[in-house]
Image (tube, rainbow, N blue to C red):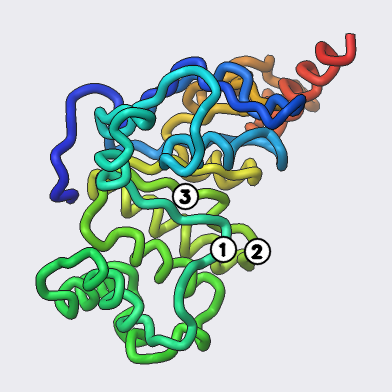
Amino acid sequence: MSTHTTTAGPAISVRGLEKSYKTLHVLRGVDFDVAPGSIFALLGSNGAGKTTAVKILSTLLKADAGAASVNGFDVATQAPDVRESISLTGQFAAVDEILTGRENLVLVARLRHLKDPGGIADDLLRRFSLTEAGARKASTYSGGMRRRLDIAMSLVGGPPVIFLDEPTTGLDPEGRIEVWQTVKELAGRGTTVLLTTQYLDEAEHLADRIAILHEGRILVNGTLTELKQLLPPAKVEYVEKQPTLEDVFLALVGAAGRKEQS
């Protein structure tokens, strides 16, 4: 559990977020809330605006309009407090491959000026099933192990909110499953997870709530059950078939595209 103080209300709150680069409108009025201790998936194709939203929430980028808060702190006016409350894991693992897994964790703990860096490292190695690999150089790790180490490094200091931007990009199926299990355990321990992904099965497998982001706008936001209810069940040979998240995503994105063209 986090050692940081959290506030009542949503762990993440976004209202009317807009961001443009000259004539390119990346975010066009985005709204959503993320409940504490939940996994929220921002699902969308490449270029939908997912990474831009995460950069604004993690104070790496300023919004053109709208407001957002993380752990009760305004991202524009209380950026240092936001940064104290979060950790960001990007699309590619940021581990030092020359160091061992344990040395990577010790280094981050020392940079954060924490007591007992070695104890913190050993605890995280246990949590992420990396104890046996802890003395090996990170360059020898599989993709899944490297990503797990990357997420473990982001948890040094116990941030209450973690952003995972496309965490399984480039991983094989086994590595993806390893990361999925890690993300579920994070939420189980009370960490709030905002996950961006373009993989439908990833959102379906992990998220408590899913928001579909398309061309800078949220098309829908709800639980998997709520999203499936947006489409009628298909009947095949008299056997009722519930729509999948893939059916919902393609129907909504296709409809939005036809509206843009009309």
**Can you give x and y, in whole percent of width and height, for residue 211 in the image?**
54, 27
- Residue, disc 2: 170
Q: Disc 1 to disc 2, how far (Cα)?
A: 9 Å
- Residue, disc 1: 92
* Horizontal side, residue 97 vs residue 79: left or right: right
* Horizontal side, residue 11 vs residue 30: left or right: left
Crowd band around label 2 with a 10 angstrom C-alpha radius: few (<14), some (14–19), many (20+)? few
**Can you give x and y, in whole percent of width and height, for residue 203 in the image?**
55, 41
Q: Amino acid at mark 3?
A: Leu
Label drawn at residue 164? 3
Q: Earlier in the sequence, mark 1 or mark 2?
A: 1
Task: Identify whether 60 is placed above or below 10.
Answer: below
Residue 2 in view (yes/no): yes
| Residue occupying the far right of the picture | 262
Q: Residue at x 82, y 20 (%)?
A: 257
Q: Residue at x 36, y 51 (%)?
A: 87
Q: Nearer the viewer, mark 1 or mark 2?
A: 1
Q: Residue at x 46, y 38 (%)?
A: 207
Q: In front here: 93 or 127?
A: 93
Query: Which quadrant holds the C terminus?
Result: top right
